[in-house]
Image (cartoon, coloured by chain):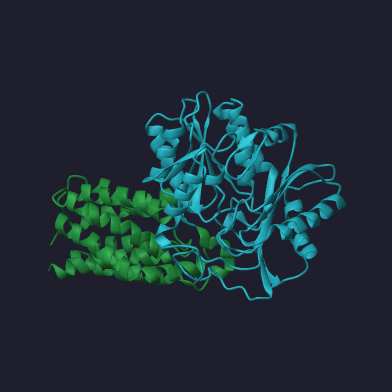
Chain colours: A cyan, B green
Amino acid sequence: MKKLINAPEQVVKEALAGMADAHADLLTVHYDPDFIVRADAPIANKVGLVSGGGSGHEPMHGGFVGKGMLDAACPGAVFTSPVPDQMLAATKAVSAGKGVLHIVKNYTGDVMNFEMAAELAAAEGIEVASVVTNDDVAVKDSLYTAGRRGVGVTVLMEKIVGGAAEAGADLAAIKRLAEKVNAHGRSMGMALTSCVVPHAGKPTFDLPDDEMEIGIGIHGEPGRTRVKVGHAADIAAMLAAPILEDLPFKQGDHVLAFVNGMGGTPLIELYLMYNELHKILAGQGITISRRLIGSYITSLEMAGCSFTLLKLDDELTKFWDAPVLTPALRWGY
Amino acid sequence: MQITADHVIKFIETITMRVKEQRDYLTQLDSAIGDADHGVNLDRGFTTVLTKLPSVADKDIGTILKTVGTTLVSTVGGASGPLYGTAFLRAGMASADRFELTVDDLAVVIEAALEGIQARGKSTRGEKTMIDAIGPAVDALKAARAAGDDLLTSLRKAVAACQAGMEATIPMLATKGRASYLGERSIGHQDPGATSAFLMAQALLEVLEASQ
């Protein structure tokens, strides 16, 4: 394993220290329990937005803390859910009396730890609502699994809901909007290579040089199929088709197209994949009216990408366009 | 023979040792069907628990177990943190203010832990989880008790049932947790949570046998 680290058990803390120094104008990092919080939190008259999850998906979630997006993020160990103490401390730090929304990706550990944190916060008199993202169409049968995983839609939700919270929406409205984003969004990912969890020291799974995993999860969970690597156009079609038929997206729809890198794929390939996606959607009469291209929800050094499509309406478009100022996303301010 | 608070302290210390010894094995089991962190996470949790034990060394069994539970919740993360944390918390509630436990009390305490895990994980038997090891252990403990077996005999039977339950997870199809994403590919692998549950059962038997 070759990595730019000092010691596996220090990776998260040392990266947090770097973030704290690099973005001191936007955020503050608290340790033990670890959480990243807006430098100006709590914001009067604003619903607090807290997310979190295992580390290794940077810039998600810490890179989305700032104006117009998250109020706080709780980083767990690499690929391990954070603990309730972190979420409780973050919830208290952002609570301004209008309630707090927990944005949770649908993984067993994340759901249970956030659930415990919400119970603890409620016991301290803080109103907490939760929304769980589960947009990964690679997981086919939710009856016999832990359900669809939360992936790319999480990023879009944090931005859109962040815009609404900044505009003063109340907790019930924020929760409804978050559920709407989840209901209108679908994702699918693929991997060209595995990733190496620092404390494991070796690849999470073996993927031969000439094969790719279609439907990969962001922790290297297996997907739908493993096939020989083909042309980008064919890979784009393999990702787009299950997304399009699942919602389903229809002719005349306007969508936000999010082409995400898994961490080890260069931007030149992501733009190439965006071009393929654009052709596929144009062929079906679907208009891309907003887009996001880059590595925003990653899986360490995994090479690969994911597509997320979000069906837009005026409300979602308005809050997507709203100003945002965070380490990883910024426009309008 | 009864289980004393001192036994419970030794039980927790023994779990900590066994988890540390088996850390890489648990992580290896988890990398086959999960996310390769079970051994690392439990080791981190119980290592912290060990530092809390001196502060509860003279306390009742309930306080000791609750301290273990809250510490695990605060340090383990993932799915096993809330699950084992809830298990020890519920076990602690079921043994509040007690300094000794009979075999009947033990059955009540372990069943409370099992119910805690089922409630937190919204899971039941046959889904390839730690419940598949703990459930049969509870059954065996109750059956042995009904047959009039003493504490050690009952516990030996429970540990044997726990081991059988753990091994029975190998051919199971996972329908809960991260292993469920593998679908059919989860078959043929032993569940890491069931394995750590068996290590804990074994640790209790080891402590009681040593103090005989």
Quadrant where the N terminus of chain B is found in the figure:
bottom left
Give x and y (percent) for residue A10: 41, 58
Q: With respect to residue A271, does A204 lie above or below?
A: below
Q: Nearer the viewer, residue B201 or B32?
A: B32
Q: With respect to residue A122, does A106 lie above or below?
A: below
- What residue is at 49 percent from the left and 53 percent from the top? A54
Q: With respect to residue A136, does A327 lie above or below?
A: above
Q: Nearer the viewer, residue B147 or A78?
A: A78
Quadrant for residue A255, please give it.
top right
* B35 displayed left or right of B85: right
Is residue B149 at least partly visible in the picture? no
Quadrant for residue A206, please give it.
bottom right
- What residue is at 28 percent from the left and 51 percent from the top? B91
* B203 displayed left or right of A139: left
Give x and y (percent) for residue A122: 41, 33
- What residue is at 57 percent from the left and 34 percent from the top? A67
- What residue is at 75 percent from the left and 63 percent from the top? A235
- Numbered marks: total: 0
Give x and y (percent) for residue A293: 70, 50
Give x and y (percent) for residue A100: 49, 33
Quadrant for residue B97, please give it.
top left
Quadrant where the C terminus of chain B is found in the figure:
bottom left
